[in-house]
Amino acid sequence: MTEINLIKIKQEKASEISGLFELSELGQSLLTQDVTPAEFIEKLIQEECFTDCINFIAYGLPKREATWWACLCARSCQSTQMNPKDAKAVESAEAWVYKPIQENAKAAFIAAEATDFKTAAGWAATAAFWSGDNLSPLDDNIVLPAPDLTAKAVAGAIMLAASQDGAAQVKNRKQTFIQQGIDIAKGGDGRKVVQ
């Protein structure tokens, strides 16, 4: 089996990423000392540890790429048209991805608040905000975000997106979203993966 080249995931060992979140028991049993991120992702997919795989990719990707992934998933779970609050949240998160400045991060938070943090779009926007340089509403008061906040928001967005159409579609959606995440980790934009 040829190992996929995940150029966006810089860690050489899967354990460098898996230690940042809680793996399931099965996921933990698949983790060996020398397994690479790509090998671990393959093992997680083979064993259908999809939640572990989503978390692993979310924590392994850089913040911009992870937030972009959340945006793609949030957009894909909407039918023909998003409600205006969700559309604004995704657009704000994408604006931060395209231009990751603090002004765009703050705008994403305002859009996320409007969703009451109940949708994938809201959590994609939260990921953008938590990727910024300051969580404080005051510019002269710096509150740095914890390093894992972006990944938590991204994973939350993707899990909400996966469950959008009910339990029957969750497995298929998770598999599609994982393939998008892998494509992004390989340097792609995730758009070529279709459901």
Image (tube, helix red, strand yellow):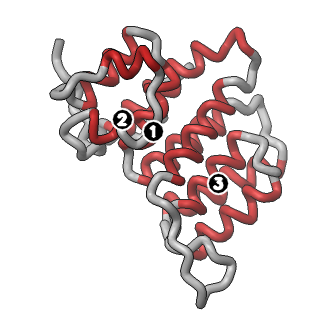
Task: Report x, y in % for residue 118.
Answer: 78, 42
Local SS, label 2: helix
Q: Residue furthest bottom?
A: 140
Task: Report x, y in % for residue 26.
Answer: 42, 14
Q: Is 81 placed above or below 134 here? A: above
Label 2 packing within 10 angstroms: few (<14), some (14-19), many (20+): many
Spatial separation of the CA atoms under disc 2 and disc 3: 24 Å
Label 1 packing within 10 angstroms: few (<14), some (14-19), many (20+): some
Of marks 1 and 3, which one's residue comes earlier in the chain? Answer: 1
Give the residue number, with chain letter if any, for mark 1.
21
Instruction: Say which quarter of the image contains residue 147.
Output: bottom left
Q: Residue at x 19, y 39 (%)?
A: 12
Task: Report x, y in % for residue 162.
Answer: 64, 25
Give the residue number, with chain letter if any, for mark 2.
18
Label 3 packing within 10 angstroms: few (<14), some (14-19), many (20+): many
Of badges 2 and 3, the one in the foreground is: 2
Of marks 2 and 3, which one's residue comes earlier in the chain? Answer: 2
- Kindly identify the amino acid type of the residue bearing the numbered disc 1: Phe
- Kindly identify the amino acid type of the residue bearing the numbered disc 3: Ala
Q: Quadrant of the C terminus?
A: top right
